[in-house]
């Protein structure tokens, strides 16, 4: 059995245009069983189009797609029986109650998961009789995850799952997604939050203008970029005259009032932070709030595309 | 099949939870019957016979009113809203697909229309002792044809309108002249000839004509025009609504 056939998702040379607009310009990737695979990029990068092609909702112009070994265009119904999907923009009827939605959608699947159990797992028990329109954004998303889990799917798609949610709700949803993976399911998600991709995904594809510009684990992507270390601290008193010169020997120094930033190579044998602390100790300079800053996926994206994600 | 039954039951509950649709299709025509019944009880009406007969004539007319209101309001608004809000999109990700919701919708509005008519008949019978039509099956056949044909207009409109709001406004703009001029809300016997001419352009007129005729024991052969117009509407409506249908 080849690797491609063992992959839960196999995409080769996917292309899709809407009129003159190229949404996906030839991308290829594989998703392995049990991983959380993320696609990140700004709006219009091609994330949603890719997910919709995977689910068979859109017909690719070119390329080969196999999801769970099925062709989404020809075997869409079989695929929908075995996958769960949460869409970026979808809704339920305003006056439909939470339990009614779960009960109704459960009837679509011959071997549906027990929705009463899902209700508890997603913390919606006390919202059982609440109409959809009265749910908060986070509760709606949790209900959508529950609906996506109803077919007891091997694979679940989550498109822009936490957009519009407050940070607390976002963290709750992340925990839920990790739970889903812990139950042996594969997750394919898209997001434009770097932090989300960094904290949640096993592998991340960075999409820009319909292409994958990088694909690796978040740590490896960041490590690749980790050419610079930053150390920041605040002086307790005025700036000692000899300090800038001493610090300049370990890195580039920037002083703004009491705030000092030192930048140096990220891959030096002695970490920059030790060097800076040594200098401060040797000169007996009082300081507080010393901290280091590392590159984030945001920086990776910036360096790969020359643009900020939400620009 | 199980999902179709569940979806239909769900749509029925949602219909009844929408106070406006439930009121206008079930309660409002009944109120009209009682109001007209009170008026007719004390004076004679031009062009009609006894009081019972006059009130009897209201039942098919007001049934036409229910058909008109349901066809242009709940169907149009519901389907346009389901598309606009992404409810159809959500259903597309399931094995059953969104057609199940349209079928369920059709079953529910047809059942509600039938219930509305049953309430009128029951009230007419119990309060005003209106006699039943001679050929009940003939009336029911006309009712099925009239409602399905007219409902097709609602589905076409839902497909054409860009937003649910637009669907609601256009539905209302089309509905009111039909209610007043088709004979559904006001006896055609009281209309001047010029208005009668105008009413020939309103689809609901044919629904009302057919229902009233059959109610009073006329044969289908006497209503060829009505039947042809309604059949044309049904066939054309199905074809056009398939073409105008959009998922999103």
Image (cartoon, helix red, strand yellow):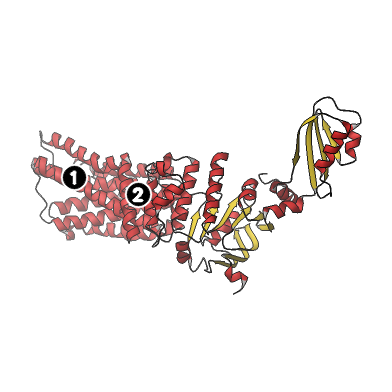
Q: Chain of mark 1?
A: B
Asked if the residues shown at circle 2 and circle 1 are in contact, with their CB atoms under 8 angstroms apart, the answer is no
Q: Residue B119 got which mark?
A: 1
Query: Left or right: B88 with respect to A175?
Result: left
Toward the viewer: A1 or A147?
Answer: A1
- Which residue is found at the position 38% from the left and 61% from the top? B239
Label 2 secondary element = helix
Quadrant assignment, res A212: bottom right
Q: Chain of mark 2?
A: B
Q: Which residue is mark 2?
A: B75
Query: How packed is label 1: few (under 14 Cα within 10 Å), some, or many (20 or more)?
Result: some
Give the Cα separation between the discs numbered 2 and 1: 21 Å
From the viewer's perspective, is residue A28 above or below residue A148?
A: below
Toward the viewer: B245 or A301?
Answer: A301
Toward the viewer: B5 or A225?
Answer: A225
- Which residue is found at the position 35% from the left and 51% from the top? B154
Asked if residue B4 shows in the view, the reply is: yes
Query: Left or right: B188 with respect to A49?
Result: left
From the viewer's perspective, is residue A282 above or below residue A298?
A: above
């Amino acid at each position: 059995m080849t690797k491609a056939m063992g992959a839960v998702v196999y995409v080769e040379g996917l292309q899709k245009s809407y009129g003159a607009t190229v949404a996906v310009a030839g991308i290829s990737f594989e998703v392995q069983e049990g991983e959380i695979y993320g696609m990140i990029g700004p709006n219009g990068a091609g994330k949603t189009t890719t997910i919709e092609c995977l689910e068979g909702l859109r017909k690719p112009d070119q390329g080969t797609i196999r999801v769970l070994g099925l062709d989404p265009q020809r075997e869409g119904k079989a695929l929908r029986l075995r996958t769960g999907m949460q869409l970026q923009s979808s809704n339920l009827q305003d006056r439909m109650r939470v339990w009614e939605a779960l009960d109704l959608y459960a009837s679509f699947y011959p071997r549906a998961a027990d929705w009463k159990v899902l209700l508890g797992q997603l913390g919606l028990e006390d919202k059982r009789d609440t109409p959809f329109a009265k749910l908060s954004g986070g509760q709606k998303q949790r209900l959508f995850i529950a609906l996506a889990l109803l077919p007891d799917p091997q694979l679940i798609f989550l498109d822009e799952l936490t957009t519009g949610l407050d940070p607390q709700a976002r963290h709750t949803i992340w925990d839920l997604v990790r739970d889903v993976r812990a139950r042996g399911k594969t997750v394919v998600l898209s997001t434009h939050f770097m932090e989300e991709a960094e904290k949640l995904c096993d592998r991340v594809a960075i999409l820009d203008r319909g292409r994958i510009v990088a694909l690796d684990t978040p740590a490896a992507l960041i490590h690749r970029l980790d050419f610079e270390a930053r150390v920041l601290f605040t002086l307790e008193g005025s700036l000692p005259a000899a300090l800038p010169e001493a610090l300049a020997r370990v890195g580039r120094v920037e002083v703004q009032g009491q705030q000092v930033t030192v930048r140096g190579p990220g891959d030096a044998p002695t970490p920059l932070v030790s060097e800076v602390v040594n200098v401060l100790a040797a000169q007996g300079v009082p300081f507080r709030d010393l901290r280091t800053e590392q590159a984030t996926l945001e920086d990776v994206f910036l360096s790969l595309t020359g643009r900020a994600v939400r620009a | 099949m199980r999902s179709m039954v569940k979806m239909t039951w769900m749509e029925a509950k949602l219909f009844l939870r929408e106070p406006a649709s439930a009121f206008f299709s079930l309660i409002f025509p009944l109120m009209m019957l009682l109001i007209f019944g009170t008026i007719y009880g004390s004076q004679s009406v031009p062009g009609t016979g006894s009081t019972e007969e006059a009130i009897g004539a209201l039942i098919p007319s007001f049934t036409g009113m229910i058909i008109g209101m349901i066809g242009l309001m709940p169907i149009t608004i519901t389907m346009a809203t389901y598309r606009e809000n992404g409810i159809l999109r959500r259903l597309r990700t399931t094995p059953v697909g969104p057609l199940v919701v349209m079928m369920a919708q059709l079953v529910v509005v047809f059942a509600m229309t039938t219930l509305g008519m049953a309430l009128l008949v029951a009230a007419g019978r119990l309060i005003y002792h209106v006699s039943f039509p001679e050929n009940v099956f003939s009336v029911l056949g006309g009712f099925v044809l009239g409602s399905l044909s007219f409902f097709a207009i609602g589905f076409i409109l839902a497909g054409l309108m860009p937003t649910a709001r637009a669907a609601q406004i256009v539905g209302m703009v089309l509905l009111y002249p039909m209610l007043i001029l088709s004979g559904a809300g006001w006896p055609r016997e009281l209309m001047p000839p010029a208005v009668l001419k105008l009413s020939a352009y309103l689809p609901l007129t044919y629904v009302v004509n057919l229902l009233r005729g059959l109610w009073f024991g006329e044969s289908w052969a006497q209503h060829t025009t009505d039947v042809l117009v309604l059949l044309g509407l049904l066939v054309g409506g199905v074809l056009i609504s398939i073409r105008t249908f959009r998922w999103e």
